[in-house]
Image (cartoon, coloured by chain):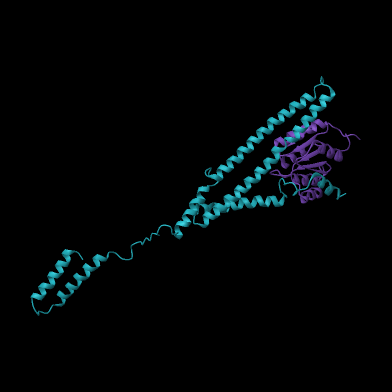
Amino acid sequence: MSRSEATELKGCIEALKAEGDRSLSAGELSDIIGEVARTLTADLGPLGTQTVTVEAPKGEPSGDSDSGAALSALTDIGTIDQGQGPLADLWHELDEIRLVTQDAAAKYLACAEGVENIAERPDLEADDQDMFAHMATNMFEAASFQDLTGQRLTRIGEILRQIEFLVASAKADLGDSSAASIVGTLSDDLEKTEHRKVEYILHGPQEAGTGNTQEEIDKILASFD
Amino acid sequence: MAVDLNMPVLIVDDYKTMLRIIRNLLKQIGFNNVDEATDGKAALEKMQQRKYGLVISDWNMEPMTGLELLKEVRADESLRPTPFIMITAESKTENVIAAKEAGVNNYIVKPFNAATLKTKLTSVLGDF
């Protein structure tokens, strides 16, 4: 109640007292009651429409800020197709490695072929021809590094796609609708890759001891005879 | 009967480096009539155009793997007798068995050397 309103109400009551034992009419009484009620409710303001914000004291976690921080961190990882973030950076680096090794292998093979051409020169002694031919053979064999590293790089790419799917799934679970819209597609792609591996028995290059050596393979083949 | 070193040979691999390696090693042995394909489907199309005395194929290729190519070759009456060697990084026992059951003549695991290639060629084609 404002000072002026309080003063006005008090003045009204004093005036009534001054009139003595005069009975108040119903109208006068309702006016007074109404005035009191109005002044009181004016101070309270609109109830039920205000948003209550509770700020957590510093150092204590609140449930909403945890999810927000997690979603923010996952978003920072990015996606491969967006071309931004560490995931896309890794994908790009793999591509660069692939191109560089491809280029290196091509140049290396050109050198090997050059050595082979020297081996075929008729003016060379037979021993020298054999030496250069043997050198070229060794170089051809060594050049297969590009095929094997390429297959490993392809496998790393598949793993990155799996990570991308896991990140999108986590974001979707935290309420990110744009992530939810791509989870299905990512899942389908991964499923197709895995299905193809199973159907066509694709394991890729193996570490020593996990696959068969040439000798072991020869024994397996011989067992069919 | 000695092997005809002039017979056409088809090598199949999705890595151009590997095609170049195998071509050069075959050349050292004496095979100079070599065609290339970068996957099973392209290889099959070539085989339907030309009669090859030997196919040397990788396994993991798209859209058609070497295993699928092998099965197609063995299913086709005109192509069935074609000698087929698999050269691949797939070294698990189930791979070798699957290839053998599909009709592969021999199987070389990557990385391989020239001596192994020559030994397998001799085993499949005869002495040369």
Outermost residue toward the top in this view: A123
Provide the letter of the chain coloured cyan: A
Quadrant the C terminus of chain B occupies: top right
Where residue B43 sits: x, y (%)?
74, 39
Q: Tell me, what hue is chain B?
A: purple
Where residue B93 sits: x, y (%)?
78, 50
Q: Judge left or right: residue B23 versus residue A23.
A: right
Vertical order, A106 against B103 (above or below): above
Where residue A91 sits: x, y (%)?
59, 43
Q: Judge left or right: residue A101 versus residue B82.
A: left
Outermost residue toward the left in this view: A19
Q: Judge left or right: residue A220 versus residue A164.
A: right
Q: Would you say residue A115 is visible in this rendering?
A: yes
Q: Would you say residue B103 is visible in this rendering?
A: no
Quadrant the N terminus of chain B occupies: top right
Residue at x 17%, y 65% (from the top left corner): A5
Viewer-proximal residue, B70 or A115? Answer: A115
